[in-house]
Image: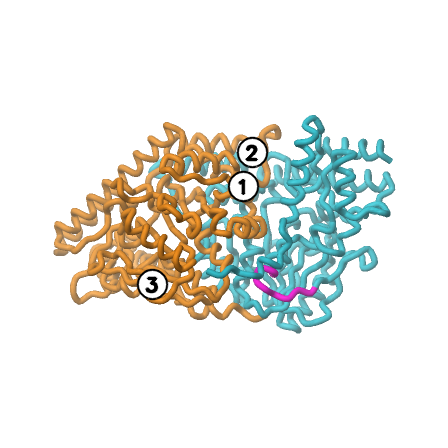
Chain colours: A orange, B cyan
Amino acid sequence: MTINTHFQQLPDNYLFKEISNRVEAFQQSHPNARVLRLGVGDVTRPLPLPVVDAMHRAVEELAHPETFRGYCPEEGYPWLRQTIIDNDYRPRGVQLELEEVFISEGAGSDLGNLSELFSSANRVAILDPSYPAYVDSSVMAGREIEFLPCHADNNFVPSLPKEKADIIYLCFPNNPTGTVLTHDQLKAWVEYARTNKSLIIFDAAYESFIEDSDIPHSIYEIEGAKEVAVEVRSYSKSSGFTAVRCGWTVVPKATGLQAMWMRRQCTKYNGTAYVAQRAAEATYTPLGKDGIQNNLAHYKGTAQLLSQGLRDLGFEVYGGKNAPYIWCRVPKGYTSWSFFDCLLNNCQIVCTPGAGFGPSGESYVRFSAFSNRKDCEEALKRLQALA
Amino acid sequence: MTINTHFQQLPDNYLFKEISNRVEAFQQSHPNARVLRLGVGDVTRPLPLPVVDAMHRAVEELAHPETFRGYCPEEGYPWLRQTIIDNDYRPRGVQLELEEVFISEGAGSDLGNLSELFSSANRVAILDPSYPAYVDSSVMAGREIEFLPCHADNNFVPSLPKEKADIIYLCFPNNPTGTVLTHDQLKAWVEYARTNKSLIIFDAAYESFIEDSDIPHSIYEIEGAKEVAVEVRSYSKSSGFTAVRCGWTVVPKATGLQAMWMRRQCTKYNGTAYVAQRAAEATYTPLGKDGIQNNLAHYKGTAQLLSQGLRDLGFEVYGGKNAPYIWCRVPKGYTSWSFFDCLLNNCQIVCTPGAGFGPSGESYVRFSAFSNRKDCEEALKRLQALA
């Protein structure tokens, strides 16, 4: 047996594993230190009660012969897919067919697995910095990558690719920079894709943080996007589902990929857990929506606290509005990893080093609004004491 | 963007989708017919109470700030991986390291996704008939396949490949034929793999149906297998988890693939749902084991009922012992699909046409012991009336 040698092009450690390894080592040598985790984009607020109730009811259904269910449809239950269309798309003027919505156990899997639908020969364009999985899954498939640098000088808004890109990964609101695109800015990408017959893989995992009205929540709000874009969505950040596992992907028939993705899912996926699908459904009930909005308001408040607090300490800060991530320039003389180590060793604060998201992240670290509020307040105090 | 053209080599419909399409069409034109589903390998018995309780407790943990959890480790929680080693391997004399066990949301995904670790150039050997996902995921990857025919003349035990095979998919107890391999028979495959530097992907999803003592439950019961085999396991059939979604894959370090699989999972998988991992853990408690065994005893009884009932009706029947599947030769003059249609139209019985598992399945249909017991009894009556 010969291995897929493209794996050898990957860095040894996945970013978040490397961070947790360093934090673990620190914690072992400093067992009494109270480490404040402000880095990883994991939620911290409990699930809202209507979601919890729905999960209990689903578990109970599986406990009795009259209501027991086995395999869920590979593409997800129609009641959840229709609820998504009715709540997340129709009110924004986007018409989707039921067959174009696929429930998944999370955006991470779909973003990786979509890669299987394309030949290795495709040229990929990826923002720099970006979520590492776009790059890593493209490397695993042996594809050539053009990085589109995002830095303070271009307001973290990437230019169009220099050479023709066949596949383009876009994530807005952006992880890690917190940048958002207006309707007109996103329209330029859809037009590029239509002209060049490219496919956009649009990661809208942070859509629920959008507050300004001229920022599209879905790429399908742009006319003509259905022919050139697949959209990946998640309940992880909107509804606190990182341990529950549920998301969805829209593959419009007009992309020519809908039947392929259905085939891929029927072959390599056995459906999303029933309890998770009922949990997702409950987020759309009136009480469910209240609970979700309540959690989101809390995280948005944390984003505001962190942005302002870091600014008051003299840091150069981006993002944190319409987005849960704060992108913070490191002080002169530091790299992003040396500043990570400095914060860990001197303040017991964990951030995410920008270099882990690509070369253009080198002078930045990411803070996350999903962090515990009290930890953020304590972190700002520790930073002030250091300054 | 250019697509992965290997997808065009796939048949249009995935077997189980095609069956459900035909059944749905029949049900629509015969709305009052009571269709008996004896085909698909989906469980029908409710989850045992200790598993249900564990799921409720896990849901409740996610409902409160003190106990809330976010992302689970990509490779699964150590407490579940250790429990698996202690219960499923150590008692059989198999020593595994914690890092060699990876929790997943089901065997189906892992069996498909493992394919990414290997180059396209590998030659694959697959039993004929077999679970369609081995073939389909190999076709999607553009690999050459040698089929190893299994028929009544060789007792459904495949011969070794004629040309050197780099990757070999083995499933024992077998789906769909219900065949099992003795220790010595499986040893021949491990020796073949060691001699030829092949990798065996061993699908042991039906291991809990084994009753005879000379049949290995894990391929690692064979000396030297750790260097040449990856083993995929599932709670779906042993514990009724087809809607819960949990399984595991063992990737021994000696295969040289453990770090690659870890990298793959960290990139394209965000961990198995917390509720599912706690449900899996509960299957190993004394009361959980009782509940599981109780359900298994029921299914084994159904296998016995179906095998004997079909035999009494004059059918040529294989499997159904140490395995949940009954492999039944169709009457002369029928193909497997025409017999499927005959049973559906004349008796409203759904079976699985053998041809869907490969050309050597052409003269057979599969019945499943997971079917509702009353439906099986009713089905045997209807068949008797027809005879």
Say whether residue A247 is visible. Answer: yes
Say which element carries label 3. Answer: loop
Residue A21 lies, with reference to residue A300, above or below; the image says below
Q: Amino acid at mark 3?
A: Pro
Tell me which chain the residue with mark 1 is part of.
B
Q: Which circle, 3 or 1, is nearer the viewer?
A: 3
- Numbered tag placed on residue A62 in the rendering: 2
Viewer-proximal residue among A310 and A323: A323
Say whether residue B298 is visible. Answer: no
Task: Where is residue A291? Give x, y as percent.
Answer: 34, 32
State the extent of the magenta-drawn residues as a range: B138-146
Compared across the picture, whether B55 is left or right of A152 comes to right
Q: Which circle, 2 or 3, is nearer the viewer?
A: 3
Task: Where is residue B308? Give x, y as percent.
Answer: 82, 40
Q: Amino acid at mark 2?
A: Leu
- Dividing the picture into quadrants, the one containing residue A280 is top left
Residue B385 lies, with reference to residue A270, above or below; the image says above
Q: In this figure, which residue is indicated by the disc labeled 3?
A: A161
Q: Residue furthest bottom?
A: B195
Disc 3 and disc 1 on one polypeptide chain: no
Quadrant of the image containing the C terminus of chain B? top right
- Numbered tag placed on residue A210 in the rendering: none
Tell me which chain the residue with mark 2 is part of.
A
Q: CA distance from mark 2 to mark 1?
A: 9 Å
- Numbered tag placed on residue B244 in the rendering: 1
Task: Where is residue A33? Give x, y as percent.
Answer: 26, 53
Count all numbered tags in the image, as a single digit: 3
Viewer-proximal residue among B77 and A203: A203
Do the CB atoms of the residues marked 2 and 1 lie less than 8 Å apart?
yes
